[in-house]
Every structure is written in C-alpha cells, then in structure tokens.
Amino acid sequence: MEKVIDEKKQGTTLAIEPKKDNSRKLFIESYGCQMNFSDSEIVASILAKEGFNTTNKLEDADLVLVNTCSIRDKAEQTVRKRLEKYNAVKRINPKMKVGVLGCMAERLKEKFLEEEKIVDLVVGPDAYKDLPNLIDEVEEGRNAVNVILSKQETYGDVSPVRLQSNGVSALVSITRGCDNMCTFCVVPFTRGRERSRDPQSILEEVNDLAERGFKEITLLGQNVDSYLWYGGGLKKDFIKATEIQKATAVGFSDLLEMVAKAQPKMRIRFSTSNPQDMTLDVIRTTAKYRNICNHIHLPVQSGSNRILNKMNRLHTRVEYFELIDNIRKIIPNCGISQDMIIGFPTETEEDHQDTLSLMEHVKYDFGFMYAYSERPGTMAGRKFEDDIPEKVKKRRLQEVIDLQQKHSHYRTQMHLGKIEEVLIEKESKKSDLHWSGRNSQSTTVVFPKENYKVGDFVNVKILDCTTATLIGEPVGYSDNN
C-alpha cells in the first residue's frame, strides 16, 4: 500500500498532441497509483513510434489498453466492469484490440485470457518495450502475454509523454519494484525487486522538462528513500558491488540535491517515502533547498506495534515518532501526510486506539485511509484470516476519517494570515473566476484569477480555510517566476 491512490484521477484517459503521420488510434485508461499513470506515459511514448496517436473516444480506438492496479479488490472490480464496456464497443468494432497492463496483469497472467474473453494481450510492468511485438502477435490472430519481471528495466531511456497537458507538473520515475515485503502488499510480486535508475538519465529528463516549461516535478518510486545507484542492478545486490562502486554510489539525498541544484526555479516533490528508509540526510536536504517542497508523505499503516510487526513493517511506533519529531525540528513548517490500513487481521480495539493516539501525536495535514481487503498472492492473504467484521472495519475507518478531518482543519487554520507561494495548476472546480494550485505543503489554495495564468508562481495571502482547502487573495508574483 506504499502508494497514494487519488480517487479523482481513477480512469483518466491519456490524450496527447497527435503526430500527423500516425494513422492508428490508442485509447489508454489508468487506474491505481501515480506509478501507473507514469507508466501510461511511457507506454504512449513507445506506441507513438509505432504509429499510434491517442484518443479519448473509446469507439474510435484500434487499440484499447487499461493500466491496472491490484492494491485493493475495488480497483480490480472497477477494471472488470470497464472490460465489460470495452466488450460492448468491440461488438460494434470487432477489429479493436484490448490489452491489460500493469499490476493486475502481472498478478493474473494467462488467467486473464481465460477469465476475460475480450482480452487480447496481457502485459506486465516490465514488458512495455515488448508491446510492438505483442501487438504484431495479436494482429496475426494470436493472444499475447509478457509478464516477465526484469532485474534491470527502469525505462530510463524512454522519454515519456506527459499526462498533464497544462504543462505545469510532471512525474519522473526514479525506481521500480520494491524489496519491502509488507504482508498486505502485492507490489514486490507484480513489479519485482527494487532497482534504481541512472541519475544522469533522471537529470536529463528533469532538464528537458524545464526547457519545455514545466514548473514542478515529483520524483516517483514505490519507495524513493531507498533509491541507490551504483552502476545498475538490483538494490539487494549492492553488497556484491566493488569498492569503487560503493564509494561512488548515489543515494536518495544525493539525487535530491543534484536535481535541486540543476533546476533551482523548479519545484521538487517526492513520493512515496518509507519510515524505515528515510534518513536525516533527506530531511536536511529538503530543508536546505528552497525549491524542494516542504511536504513528506510518510505512510504509517497502523499505530500499533503488534499490527506493524504483523504487517512486516520495519519500524516501531517509537521510531516513527522520532522520525516525525526530527522532521518537525529540521523543517518546522513541513506538511506530513499518511497512508493507513484499518481492520488488518487480528486488529483489536486496543490496536485501533493506538492508531488514533498516534494520529493525535502527529496531527497529519491529510491522509489516505482504507479498510483492509485481502489481496490474493500477498503473505497476509496466504497466512492470515480476514477476521475483522465489515461492520467493525467501517466503524473504525469512520473514526479515523473523522479524526483526520479534525486534524486537517487544525493544520489548514495554521496558514491563516500568512503569505504563501502557490503554483497555479488549473481553474478551480467550483468557480471559473478562481485559480487552484498548491503551496509548498501540498495543500490546495484557491484565489481570484485577476491577471495571472496557469504555471505562474503567485504569492497569496491566506484569508480563510476549509478542512482541505485554503482560500486567499493574490498579492503579486513570487520571485520564482
């Protein structure tokens, strides 16, 4: 669950500027975490070279791809419903081919072809470069599957297209896979072991984005803090590296500093962090550079040591508190957000109260909270009985959500009266007279449009707030433009 799933973005269709010589049409829809949305950009880039332009009209598509998530049962059921919709369109357009990408493809493999008769190809997260060959197979009348996990693939040599057509924010993937065998999580089995991308290719991508006018990047990985480049290969094999490789290795705080120095006018975010891997170096580097945003997403999952141990989380409650206290000390105005799983097997009322008391200590700015759902293929799915009644899960989850809302309001109120730099991202959903953007802490800020435009850095005086949004008035451009 080391992933932030933005419910508002689920099912987003990728549409990019068409190339005039491309004649085939690709409809690609994404579900799940930011990694999946980033992967869809990589896929679109690969297929653009194969003659495909994107379309957001399903009926026009020659090829339909759905990039899937396995983190929760709800995500998988949503994908199955979408496949039913594709099936209805395919009856009208029998030449249309349908493929499943991502974690659900990796988890189910060939079963997908048997269970979902509509599916023509199944492609795991490490096999996207093989898509041209797989599409050729399908067009010759054969089903195609490639779910081989790689020890090397980072897609560092693929320049992704960009989902955000406003040209303001971009995701830059720095790692793939995960070595943390959390018992609730399927990621190590669907995305493979952890490996990091060459820092030079990351810098080249960031510099290219800056040249193209992007104002903000998010360094992205299942667990960014454990980024480690020593010339390529799996992180677990670092112990076998030569002395020179070890001496010249680049860790996450090194990478963060390199990117911050390379583009001092560009905002830098990173996600997702893991408490066991976050070091003081990363916190100090974040504090040192103005362009690194003061926001850390730090999933805790539970406030109970017993449940943390059962989840195979390699941090304790006390260690987590120490980390939070260090963040508060080194970056006093840092926004901190969480992931929380409620109702994990054997969770007692005492465990639940431990979670609530941890939240009271931290007072997160915002969070992503879910009731536990058993995932096939995980250690928890194999070894633990899902023994917490749904009614109890719902009640506990609601208590966590209610407390988080209280804390979110407490945190937004702390911004009142302050002047804060906001990067304009889009028009406000509630008013076409207002802009919407985020401050350094990743809190949404809305303010009157006046003469500003998307992509501007604006100083905004915060006058009012809700539990999730700051409301203000612009007082001028920031010196970051």
Image: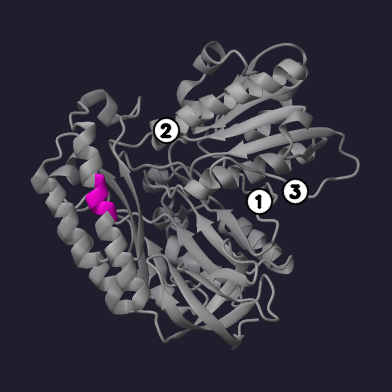
Query: x%, y% of residue 379?
Result: 28, 29
Q: Which residue is mark 3?
A: 16
Give percent across and percent down for residue 171.
58, 55
From the viewer's perspective, is 224 left or right of 460?
left
In the image, residue 428 lies at what x, y percent? 59, 65
On the rendered structure, is 275 left or right of 43?
Answer: left
User: Does the magenta-highlighted stretch encompass residue 301?
Assistant: no
Viewer-closest of 1 and 426: 426
Label disc, if present, on residue 74 of the rendered structure: 2
Question: Reading the chain from its start, which is encountered first: label 2 or label 3?
Answer: 3
Instruction: Tell me whether circle 1 and circle 2 mark residues in contact (CB < 8 Å).
Output: no
Q: Which residues are magenta?
A: 397-401
From the image, tell me which residue sits under label 1.
163
Q: Secondary structure at mark 1?
A: loop
Q: Residue at x 35, y 66 (%)?
A: 365
Circle 3 residues within 10 Å: few <14, some 14–19, many ≥20: some
* In the image: residue 24, left or right of residue 114: right
Type of residue at label 3?
Ile
